Amino acid sequence: MTSELMSLTWVTTLTALMWMPYILNLIAVRGLVDAVGYPEDPKPLSPWAAKMKAAHSNAVENLVVFAALVLIANAADVSNAVTVLACQIYFWARLVHLLSYTFAIPWVRTLAFAAGFACQIAIVLQLI
């Protein structure tokens, strides 16, 4: 497995696990019956959990682009120091984005998002 595919595996795993904390909060706030049902007037998530849910949605949206780029690079046999580093930085940028979004750390969330986007552009530049 290439380093880029391993990074994609880690990014996908991180994204796949992001829902767990905010769902536990949902159960704690609403109770199990309302958490699995469709209450008419549901109690809101805790503020941190609502932000984590938004960060998860953002991660899923960006995973589509990142995964496609990594898979295209793999299929095209494009692998070099730039693609390897971009994929590794992307993982850490997404982790920082999740934490900074969840805990409302000003500027860091935006910088982490921008770093992840820059990694996607770096891979695109290696492909064209």
Image (cartoon, rainbow, N blue to C red):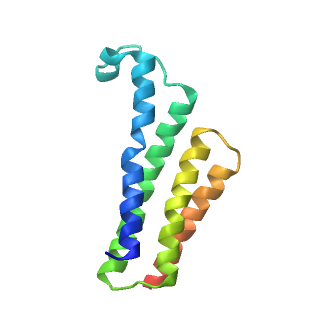
Quarter of the image where the N terminus is located: bottom left
What residue lies at 44% left-to-right and 57% top-to-bottom? 62
Give above or below for 61 relative to 73.
Answer: above
- Left or right of residue 53, residue 99 in this image: right
Residue 113 position in % (x across, y down):
58, 57
Residue 60 position in % (x across, y down):
40, 51
What residue lies at 43% left-to-right and 19% top-to-bottom? 28
Of residue 76 and residue 3, the one placed in the foreground of this image is 3
Of residue 121 and residue 77, the one placed in the foreground of this image is 77
Q: In which quarter of the image is residue 76?
A: bottom left
Residue 55 position in % (x across, y down):
50, 44
Q: How many labels does the image show?
A: 0
Give above or below for 31 relative to 62.
Answer: above
- Left or right of residue 79, residue 82 in this image: right
Give above or below for 128 relative to 84.
Answer: below
Give above or below for 71 relative to 128.
Answer: above
What residue lies at 47% left-to-right and 78% top-to-bottom? 83
The extreme right residue here reads 106
Of residue 27 and residue 115, the one placed in the foreground of this image is 27
User: Can residue 120 be seen in the rendering of this structure?
Assistant: no
User: Can residue 21 be seen in the rendering of this structure?
Assistant: yes
Quarter of the image where the C terminus is located: bottom left
What residue lies at 70% left-to-right and 50% top-to-bottom? 107
Residue 39 position in % (x across, y down):
34, 15
